[in-house]
Image: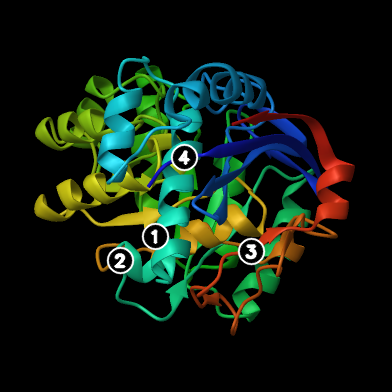
Amino acid sequence: MKIEELNIYHVAMPLIDPWITSYGADYEIHSILIKAKSDGYEAWSETCALELPTYSYESANSIFYNISEIFGKKVIGNEYESSTKLNDELRVYKGNPFAKAGLDIAWWNLKSEISKTPLHKLIGGTRNEVIAGADFGVEKNIETLLSKIQIAVDKSTPRIKLKIKKGWDKEVLAAVNSTFPNSIFHVDCNGGYTMEDLDFFKSIDKYQLAFIEQPLSSDDLIDHAKLSKAIETPICLDESINGVERAIQAVEIEACEYINIKPGRVGGLTNSLEINKIAENAGIPVWVGGMLESALGASICIALATLENFTYPGDLFPSDRFYKDDLCKPENKFKSPYIFEPLNELPTPNLELLNKYTVKSAKLN
């Protein structure tokens, strides 16, 4: 497959409500869309690390720059018989997995188009349905949070994720546990704590959470391994797993009992598949995460979650959870509450909305 043309778009998609976590509030989701062409075929990909370098050291601007000025120019006009070859070509550049993911996912989606094989089947998926969970960020008060959780519980959500941060943790967990004692919960710290908070982590063992997601720094594995041995609640790594090598190291030092796989964060679908294999061989279940992407990016995550080892309900959402009018069509919808079906054809941008939300664009050929 020869990559003959790349059209790169930096878009800013307004959220219905701000998404608040330990690293701040996002009012728009800044994402990078790529249209890739090869031999008369075209396919879209999406990669999103948010507007600012908060979740990751990458940002929408850095991703756009690296793809349009460096990575894209490296691969344009070249033949890649496999996604591994494409990734090997980009290996000379350090880090920047979100930027690399945009091109890796574009390769897979082109392959899907050319071979007329749905993406989920192309990557080895076996499920025709994918289970999602309910997620809740930091709210203005606990009462608002409880009312929103009640709606999810009434719809029989299989699990609930709570974003916590210092000052929004102890009272929140106590209130949620007492109000919904029979529901499955886990908490996501987004790296907002340190080992100095060990007493706090020990104190929440009593809630029997499914796990604690990314309690410590995104750069850390060592302290996560220490924390994992010091508390009863399992540890799940998210931001710390930014590539295959980090996954191998995390498994080796027993830094986690679960791994969250976000295709963008780990460098694309090729690395996602490898990390899943590493985890499965180690007996570690995985689950898919998202970055509040459009229906396109979410559908890529749904396709990934059709693999057998993705056993914990994913961070997957219908479009109307965050967007009044999703940039990409068709919009994501539940088949039934908290159940998605993988699509045979991935969503693509509505051109009118693409023009409306585009911050800047570039073309390589």
Quarter where residue 115 is shown: bottom left
- What residue appears at the point 63 percent right and 49 percent down from the top-left corner? 293
Amino acid type indicated by mark 1: Leu
Label 2 close to label 4 by CB (< 8 Å):
no
Does residue 327 lie above or below 6 as drawn? below
Does residue 338 lie above or below 322 as drawn? below
| Mark 4 or mark 1: whose residue is earlier in sequence | 4
Q: How is the image coloured?
A: rainbow
Quarter where residue 171 is shown: top right
- What residue appears at the point 57 percent right and 38 percent down from the top-left corner? 5
Please provide percent x and percent y for residue 108. 41, 52
Amino acid type indicated by mark 4: Ile
Label 4 close to label 3 by CB (< 8 Å):
no
Residue assigned mark 1: 304
Front residue (pair 74, 56): 74
Amino acid type indicated by mark 3: Pro
- What residue appears at the point 47 percent right and 55 percent down from the top-left corner? 109
The Cα atoms of the two marked residues, 3 and 1, are separated by 15 Å
Front residue (pair 265, 312): 265
Q: Secondary structure at mark 2?
A: loop
Residue assigned mark 3: 347
Residue 168 is tagged as: none
The Cα atoms of the two marked residues, 3 and 2, are separated by 20 Å
- What residue appears at the point 32 percent right and 33 percent down from the top-left corner? 87
Q: Which is in the foreground here, disc 3 or disc 1?
A: 3
Residue 307 is tagged as: 2
